[in-house]
Amino acid sequence: MTRIMPMLVLVAAGLVSVGAQAQQPDIDSIITGACERDSITRAEIGAMTMNAESYSRKLGGDGAVKEEKKFLKSYAFKGKLFKEEFREYYLDGKLQDERELKKQVAESNERRRKGRSRDASINPMEPFYPENRGKYVFTLTGKELQHGCVSYHIVADCLVEDENLYEGDFWFEVNWLNLVHAEFHPAKMPTTIKMLDMTKSYGPVEYGYWLPVGFHLRGKGQAMLFIKFNFEVEERYSGHKIHVGLTDDFFTEGIIED
């Protein structure tokens, strides 16, 4: 009997191990399902708009705010089309006039033209799209509670240095595989930038669809040998509207209406 018991223990341990492995979700299935959910959501909501309370802050080396710009904006989306509309501009809490607002709009348009915008237009799902998957190694770390949701935690490591690609940590809720939260950064830092850490959060805000609810960015850079800068961007989203019936022409001219 003493010889049989250790063998039984080993067999039992093996069965438990095999059972645990069988219950582990397949990472490829999760990624494929998450992309399908993303595609379905985009197709079903059609064109959408949302309001943004946006902050752009210059920070000191100790993290203290040296200057804060606040913008009230509207964003519009339709497939890959995107548009930003500025409504109000505040500098250190003081409302600025139309002339100053137009200057900020011009600066934003120039950053967007150069591909340097960091706001609601960033799509954290891009690493998981079929055309990009071959550029990544994905690791499933398990299930975790993220923003109150039991979620699959997937780490995406980019295999190429490209400032237009992102890598980091991503959480997908286990029921429908909607993206809940992403903590990510460029696979290659843009020129003069030393750090660019971003987060973007989603929630079931309109008819159960998971849409953006917040974005945050913290960055550090060095323009010249002795010129260092720290900055922060924060956006909070509300007033989501779906099925708003915007034409493609809207995204090249006109304004977002309430």
Image (cartoon, rainbow, N blue to C red):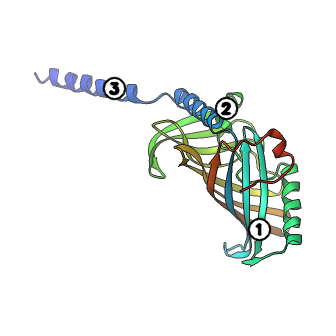
The answer to which image quadrant residue 23 occupies is top left
Q: Locate residue 214, reporting x and y percent.
A: 61, 56
Q: Is 80 or 150 nearer to us in this picture? A: 80
The N terminus lies in which quarter of the figure?
top left
Q: Amino acid at mark 1?
A: Glu
Local crowd size for mark 2, using a 10 Å CA cut-off: few (<14), some (14–19), many (≥20): some
Q: Amino acid at mark 3?
A: Gly
Q: Residue at left 25%, top 22%?
A: 11
Distance of label 3 from label 1 (alpha carbons): 58 Å
Q: Is 50 or 176 nearer to us in this picture? A: 50
Res 246 label: none
Of labels 3 and 1, the one closer to you: 1
Q: Say which label, 2 or 3, has the lower sequence index.
A: 3
Q: Residue at left 60%, top 32%?
A: 40
Q: Locate residue 193, reporting x and y percent.
A: 78, 57
Q: Does any portion of residue 217 appear in the rendered image? A: no
Q: Residue at left 88%, top 49%?
A: 113
- Of helix, strand and loop, which one carries label 2? loop
Res 129 label: 2
197 relative to 207 in the view: left or right: right
The residue to which callout 1 is attached is: 88
Of labels 2 and 1, the one closer to you: 1
Distance of label 2 from label 3 (alpha carbons): 31 Å
The residue to which callout 3 is attached is: 19
Q: Amino acid at mark 2?
A: Tyr
181 relative to 221 in the view: left or right: left
Q: Say which label, 2 or 1, has the lower sequence index.
A: 1
